[in-house]
Image (tube, grey):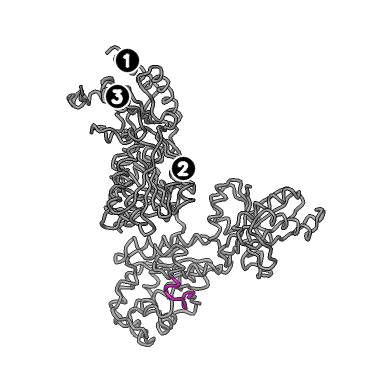
């Protein structure tokens, strides 16, 4: 019954890409023209190693420092730190492993949630093997963790709390500011936030009311794959998790890709300046209204989700089926999360929010980006209606 | 409670008798230069204090950032304003005091009542306002002598000004009020600190740097430019004179024996510096020498080097330890620049064992062997390149970011 998309000849696939409606922006986004131009120009003009002491190296280094300055101003922490990484996963790894190991003399207790990205969950599992004590916060059916539970679980020896801002599968928003307040009042723990899905869509800063560190990924905000960073407040620095020539002040070894840094800084600026959120909100509401006209599907995290993510669960239909049907109509969506879409196991997030039994396998995710238009939403509604008719007939 | 005015208290100016106006005018100029680019800021310099107003909150934040670097300012305080009614004064007094850490602190109310028609006299006001603050803020107690928090209330005809939080200024005297000197700036840790300390005493500086291309690099020069720019933050513009020194240095290395060559090199530098000083009308030469630090900085060496001129050579670091100098360098943010590893003209052609007790007679004897010494020195002075700092803004990469 699995009609596999990849069995189609590649040429026909590429031919079709031109007309596609791309609603999988939480998996990755299309790089903007400006971003590509920055990448090419920076590679041509500033290819030197920023650690070299000759003029070309110094110029490149000046550009690198300028990118840091720009990023830190965007997140409201001008005296903070930027550690460039290869993306969100590495930044999350660095935050969890790096902060835990750095502060292990203060305590060995770590708190995170059950719906984190695997780059956090697998990292804390590693920490558990190293003898750290891990507590997981549960989430309610809307995918939101509870402050009471956080308060209960915070201990004197809690050293790291890591909570994602927006969930990548269902879009649920966590109360970051309230968590920060509680954590800072009750413990000395470092509060890390995975802001990969939220940056540019919801306000998130490293100011006094915010977290101490956060993860950013370039390719989720119309930047490039392979770009990302761990941002932190001035005194909050991890132990390195790789070893080498002492680049990035020794926190992330390996020659720094200045073009990537420039691309990330620009993508962050463009994302921060962008005013698409109200459109996302409008589209999300329109789609919810449309989907709720029939009773074959429910909306997950309906009132707690970020505006750019809509998670829909079909009753007794597998998510792949829906994804395939839409794809035939040039609309690209994903089952719950692109990272885990290919292995057939049920997502840990869907487990955690207790989706009713008949709906569990039928989750799809629609995620908006800056290139989407009102017309595409209308087209989606049309195809959705056709799909429902087909189901009812079948 | 919003505030948009700062009260600035003068530093040592108070002692300056009839020259006072000169100092105040200079300080006003320097403050204006330091706040360059902040459109909404206005400066009003009075005899006893200066007022800065800014309508834009961002500008005000920037003012608070830049002001602590300006010499001649003892301290400054945000000013809160309210209407001359007791109710308003009470309320504003509370928020003014709350700017400070209050737990366990002592405080005092000070009144200046220029509006003599105000219904209460100073003594009464002191008690009324003090009592109100005490009742409403826990953990405070009253102390008349040296209180931690001084709430100053200035009662005027149409408004009341309150200040309480005090920010420390840089102290010293306004740069430019004590004349002009020439700083010998090598690119090491010491010389920028020496420049800073002279500026603190109100001295305006030009800087002189010796370069020996191709043995020294563009980066070494850039480093000195960067250092001089750092010093600009403490008051005004700096002209940097870069002297082409290669030819002279090679000649000295060739003609003069190892033991004396270092001393001769320094003497040549001093002589060039003195000529430049004369041309620009400066009154002294400043160096970062610290006694006994290296062979050229022993008393014997200093004597031999100093012999070329009768101009005052000021050595503000002479009695400081290296670690004390490094502390200051870090404070003024020149340390990181200074420790960048570029060869400068002092480190090339250095003999393995320079004499720590050079004999002036011997040095002069060998120097006489270089017949065209004067011509070379003239040429070096003549061919210098002058940078006017601060240079234009750094590259902003706006096309990329």
Chain ID for label 3? A
Chain ID for label 2? A
Q: Tell me the residue that label 3 is attached to.
A: A20
Residue B59 location (% of width, % of height)? 56, 49
Whether discs 3 and 1 lie on one chain: the answer is yes
Q: Tell me the residue that label 2 is attached to.
A: A148
Q: Nearer the viewer, residue B3 or B304?
A: B3
Q: Give residue A386's mark.
A: 1
Q: Nearer the viewer, residue A224 or A302?
A: A302
Instruction: Provide the secondary structure element on which disc 1 rests.
Output: helix
Mark-to-mark CA distance, 2 and 3: 45 Å
Instruction: Name the mark nearer the viewer: 2 or 3.
Output: 2
Q: Residue at x 70, y 53 (%)?
A: B161
- The picture quadrant where one finds residue B120 is bottom right
For the residues labelled 3 and 1, say whether their Cβ atoms are less than 8 Å apart.
no
Chain ID for label 1? A
- The picture quadrant where one finds residue A319 is top left
Q: Which residues are magenta?
A: B315-325
Q: Residue at x 53, y 72 (%)?
A: B283
């Amino acid at each position: 019954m699995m009609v596999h998309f990849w069995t189609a000849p590649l040429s026909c696939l590429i031919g079709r890409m031109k007309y596609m409606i791309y609603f999988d922006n939480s998996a990755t986004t299309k790089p903007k023209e400006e971003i590509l131009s920055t990448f090419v120009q920076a590679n041509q003009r500033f290819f030197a190693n920023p650690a070299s002491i000759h003029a070309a190296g110094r110029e490149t280094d000046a550009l690198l420092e300028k990118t840091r300055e720009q990023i830190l101003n965007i997140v409201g922490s001008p005296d903070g730190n930027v550690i460039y990484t290869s993306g969100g996963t590495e930044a999350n790894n660095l935050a969890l492993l790096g902060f835990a190991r750095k502060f292990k003399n203060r305590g060995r207790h770590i708190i995170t949630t059950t719906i984190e990205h695997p780059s956090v969950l697998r990292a804390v599992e590693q920490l558990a093997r190293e003898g750290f004590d891990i507590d997981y916060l549960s989430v309610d059916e809307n995918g939101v963790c509870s402050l009471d539970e956080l308060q209960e679980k915070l201990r004197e020896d809690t050293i790291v709390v890591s909570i994602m801002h927006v969930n990548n599968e269902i879009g649920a928003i966590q109360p970051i500011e309230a968590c920060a307040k509680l954590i800072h009042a009750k413990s000395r723990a470092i509060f890390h936030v995975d802001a990969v899905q939220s940056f540019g869509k919801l306000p998130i800063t490293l100011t006094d009311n915010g977290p101490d560190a956060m993860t950013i990924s370039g390719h989720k905000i119309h930047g490039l794959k392979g770009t990302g960073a761990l941002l932190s407040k001035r005194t909050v620095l991890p132990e390195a998790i790789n070893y080498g020539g002492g680049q990035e002040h020794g926190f992330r070894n390996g020659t720094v890709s200045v073009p990537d840094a420039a691309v990330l800084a620009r993508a962050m600026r463009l994302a921060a300046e962008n005013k698409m959120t109200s459109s996302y909100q409008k589209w999300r509401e329109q789609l919810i209204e449309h989907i709720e006209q029939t009773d074959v599907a429910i909306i997950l995290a309906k009132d707690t989700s970020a505006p750019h993510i809509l998670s829909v669960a079909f009753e007794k239909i597998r998510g792949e089926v829906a994804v395939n049907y839409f794809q035939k109509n040039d609309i690209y969506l994903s089952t719950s999360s692109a990272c885990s879409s290919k292995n057939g196991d049920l997502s840990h997030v869907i487990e955690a929010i207790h989706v009713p039994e008949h709906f569990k396998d039928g989750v799809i995710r629609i995620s908006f980006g800056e290139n989407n238009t009102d017309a595409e939403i209308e087209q989606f509604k049309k195809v959705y209606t056709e799909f429902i008719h087909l189901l009812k007939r079948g | 409670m919003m505030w948009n005015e700062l009260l600035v208290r003068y530093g040592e100016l108070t002692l300056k008798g009839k020259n006072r106006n000169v100092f105040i005018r200079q300080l006003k100029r320097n403050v204006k230069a330091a706040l360059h680019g902040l459109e909404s800021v206005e400066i009003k310099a009075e005899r006893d204090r200066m007022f800065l107003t800014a309508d834009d909150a961002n500008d005000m934040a920037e003012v608070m950032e830049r002001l602590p670097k300006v010499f001649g300012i003892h301290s400054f305080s945000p000013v809160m304003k309210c209407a001359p009614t007791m109710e308003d004064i009470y309320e504003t007094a509370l928020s003014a005091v709350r700017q400070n850490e209050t737990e366990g602190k002592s405080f005092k109310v000070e009144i200046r009542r220029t509006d003599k028609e105000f219904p209460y006299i100073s003594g009464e006001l002191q008690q009324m306002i003090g009592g109100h603050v005490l009742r409403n803020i826990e953990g405070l107690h009253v102390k008349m002598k040296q209180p931690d928090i001084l709430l100053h209330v200035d009662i005027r005809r149409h408004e009341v000004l309150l200040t309480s939080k005090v920010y420390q200024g840089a102290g010293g005297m306004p740069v430019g009020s004590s004349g002009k000197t020439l700083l010998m700036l090598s690119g090491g840790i010491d010389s920028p600190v020496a420049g800073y300390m002279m500026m603190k005493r109100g001295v305006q500086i030009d800087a002189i740097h010796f370069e020996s291309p191709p043995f020294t690099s563009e980066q070494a020069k850039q480093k000195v430019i960067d250092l001089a720019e750092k010093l600009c933050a403490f008051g005004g513009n700096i002209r940097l004179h870069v002297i082409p020194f290669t030819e002279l240095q090679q000649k000295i290395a060739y003609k003069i024996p190892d033991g004396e060559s270092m001393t001769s090199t320094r003497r040549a530098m001093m002589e060039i510096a003195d000529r430049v000083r004369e041309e620009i009308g400066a009154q002294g030469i400043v160096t970062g020498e610290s006694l006994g630090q290296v062979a050229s900085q022993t008393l014997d060496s200093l004597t031999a080097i100093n012999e070329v001129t009768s101009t005052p050579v000021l050595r503000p670091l002479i009695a400081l330890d290296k670690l004390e100098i490094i502390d200051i360098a870090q404070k003024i943010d020149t340390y990181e620049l200074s420790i960048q590893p570029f060869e400068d003209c002092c480190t090339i052609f250095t003999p393995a064992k320079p004499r720590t007790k050079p004999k002036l007679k011997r040095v002069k004897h060998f120097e006489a062997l270089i017949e065209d010494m004067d011509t070379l020195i003239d040429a070096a002075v003549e061919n210098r390149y002058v940078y006017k700092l601060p240079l234009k803004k750094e590259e902003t990469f706006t096309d990329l970011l």
